[in-house]
Image (tube, grey):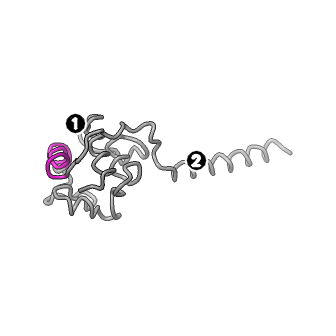
């Protein structure tokens, strides 16, 4: 085989590996662990986090990508691309990957010059809420 053919084969296989890596969900090892708190509720535990960090861009007046995080119903509905969580499994869906900064860097949240990132404890609480049924 010529060097050209070897380079072509390597490029094709390298491209295929890169494409399949994009389809892989974020590694759970890079996510903060879910909180051990039980009975996590949207109204008392999650909404205050969203109000402080998310609703500037994901409120009813300015729903970025159609995502409104001001109520349980609108959060579960998701946005233009559908739901952002998979109830019962916090390792799936886009919300946790975005706030934990895993996966696609273009999706990392919150954005903006003065945006304050969520803490691992906040992300863990949101994970627990999703895992416990997102109620």
Whether residue 30 appears in magenta in the rendering, the answer is: no
Task: Name the residue located 25 percent from the left edge and 44 percent from the top edge.
Answer: 38
Magenta residue span: 42-54
Q: Give the vertical position of 123 relative to 62 (above or below).
A: above
Which of the pair 49/18 is nearer the observer? 49
Who comes first in sequence, dot 1 or dot 2? 2
Picture quadrant of residue 85: bottom left
Task: Name the residue located 33 percent from the left edge and 40 percent from the top edge.
Answer: 34
What residue is disc 2 on? Answer: 18
Where does the image place residue 22, in percent across and percent down from the top left?
51, 50
Picture quadrant of residue 69: bottom left
The 10 Å Cα crowd at callout 2, few under 14, some 14 to 19, many 20 or more, is few
Task: Name the residue located 63 percent from the left edge and 51 percent from the top edge.
Answer: 16
Residue 64 is marked as none
Q: Give the vertical position of 43 relative to 113 (above or below).
A: below
What residue is disc 1 on? Answer: 116
Q: Main secondary structure of the magenta part?
A: helix
Q: Secondary structure at mark 1?
A: loop
Q: Is residue 56 left or right of residue 23?
A: left
Q: Is residue 25 left or right of residue 79?
A: right
Q: Is residue 120 left or right of residue 4?
A: left
Which of the pair 46/10 is nearer the observer? 46
Where does the image place residue 119, in percent across and percent down from the top left?
26, 34
Where does the image place residue 50, in percent across and percent down from the top left?
19, 47
Whether residue 43 appears in magenta in the rendering, the answer is: yes
Q: Secondary structure at mark 2?
A: helix
């Amino acid at each position: 085989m010529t060097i050209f053919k070897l380079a072509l084969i390597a490029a094709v296989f390298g491209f295929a590996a890169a494409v399949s890596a994009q389809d892989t969900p974020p590694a759970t090892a890079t996510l903060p662990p879910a909180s051990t708190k039980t009975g996590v509720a949207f109204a008392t535990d999650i909404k205050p986090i969203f109000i402080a960090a998310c609703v500037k861009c994901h409120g009813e007046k300015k729903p970025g990508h159609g995502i409104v995080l001001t109520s349980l119903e609108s959060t579960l509905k998701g946005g233009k691309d559908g739901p952002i969580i998979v109830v019962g499994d916090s390792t799936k869906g886009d919300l946790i990957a975005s706030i934990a900064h895993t996966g696609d860097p273009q999706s990392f949240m919150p954005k903006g010059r003065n945006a304050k990132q969520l803490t691992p404890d906040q992300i863990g609480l949101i994970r627990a809420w999703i895992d416990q049924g997102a109620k």
